[in-house]
Amino acid sequence: MKEAGFYTTRDDGKTVCHLCPDNCLIANGKRGACKVRRNEDGRLIAENYGLVSAMHVDPVEKKPLYHYYPGRPILSLGTAGCNLHCIFCQNWEISQATVEEIPLRKLSPEEAVSAALRIEDNIGIAYTYNEPVIWYEYVKDTALLAREKGLKNVMVTNGYVNPEPLEDMIRFIDAFSVDLKGFNENFYKRYTRSKLQPVLEALKAIRASGRHLEITNLVIPELNDDVEEFEAMTDWIVRELGRETILHISRYFPAWKLHNAPTPLSTLQKFFDIASRKLDYVFLGNVASLGVGQDTICPQCGHTVIERLGYATRITGLDEEGRCVHCGKKIIGTTNDEG
């Protein structure tokens, strides 16, 4: 446990957490909505500091990040808790748990960095599986040490964070994979118990920072699969973030409290076609049978420059500077941290 950042204490001893837009008012001995930040006699404590629920070596494509050091492994760490409560969460066992409810192992920032350095060809550390925003103190300490050793830091996040902590995170996080769960405030409120607008503001801030950014949209039948809404979302991405923004359209499967049928392949194909008319880099996740949406295609000449089969990646059409060997087009984010 460690004292948390971004909070104030009121005269009555209650703490106000300013890490995410919930701005939880927390009484003594109680936790915030994320389940891991607790008021202890007027001090806000990060109960999940140095506690790890999952530790694996993943291909970076699994985050998903398709244009950030493609084909390389990354050490991936998760803990407990989340500031959202998505009824379709695939990792609900850890995201909706307190530190007392699941098995956790201690892992100091120094131990995490040492582990990352022992992995062959590893690019760095990904903070993932549950929501890393609510692991802020540990992520910061670990990321700064990792940077000193030449490692990269990746955050797989819901983007539900206040501007001040996000500004700080941008200093030590090199790449962001952000879930844009829908494009409707009612959807966010009803199915995630959060708000859409702060996520949109976070996306704009990350893009403006120059950090690498990729977005994932999980398409759920009957909940966020409205065609006009998806059109509006892609239009917003182009307008606010740029047509080179990388978008992953992911297939939903039943999880936790939601038992809707999996996303029809026809819906994924339709949304892929819509997004591809507006964005240069569109991919499909959780599906390989459509025969599209896996490879990176040069938006200028149409040649395949990166081939993918599952998480196996083969760079076939890029030079050492990340340019298409056929036409010279720079393919965004394939050789460095540029977003």
Image: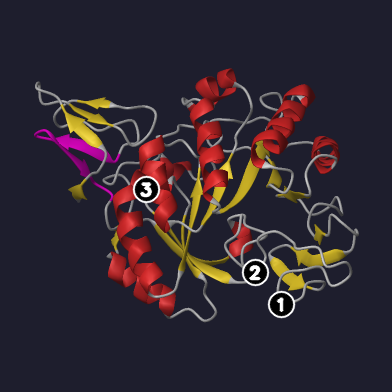
Secondary structure under the numbered disc 1 in the rendered image: loop
Residue at image mark 1: 320
Secondary structure under the numbered disc 3 in the rendered image: helix
Q: Is residue 52 visible?
A: no
Q: Determine contact: label 1, label 2, CB under 8 Å.
A: yes
Task: Residue type at mark 2: give it.
Answer: Thr
The Cα atoms of the two marked residues, 2 and 3, are separated by 25 Å
Determine crowd level at label 2: few under 14, some 14-19, many 20+ residues with C-alpha closer than 10 A.
Answer: some
Q: Nearer the viewer, residue 213 or 113?
A: 213
Q: Earlier in the sequence, mark 1 or mark 2?
A: 1
In this picture, residue 325 sits left or right of residue 28: right
Magenta stretch: helix, strand or loop mostly: strand
How many marks the image carries: the answer is 3
Residue at image mark 3: 168
Chain part drawn in magenta = 36-48
Residue at image mark 2: 335
Q: Earlier in the sequence, mark 3 or mark 1?
A: 3
Q: Any magenta on residue 130?
A: no
The location of residue 147, given as percent across then percent down, is 40, 68
Q: Is residue 39 above or below residue 313?
A: above
In this picture, residue 32 sits left or right of residue 254: left
Task: Residue type at mark 3: give it.
Answer: Asp
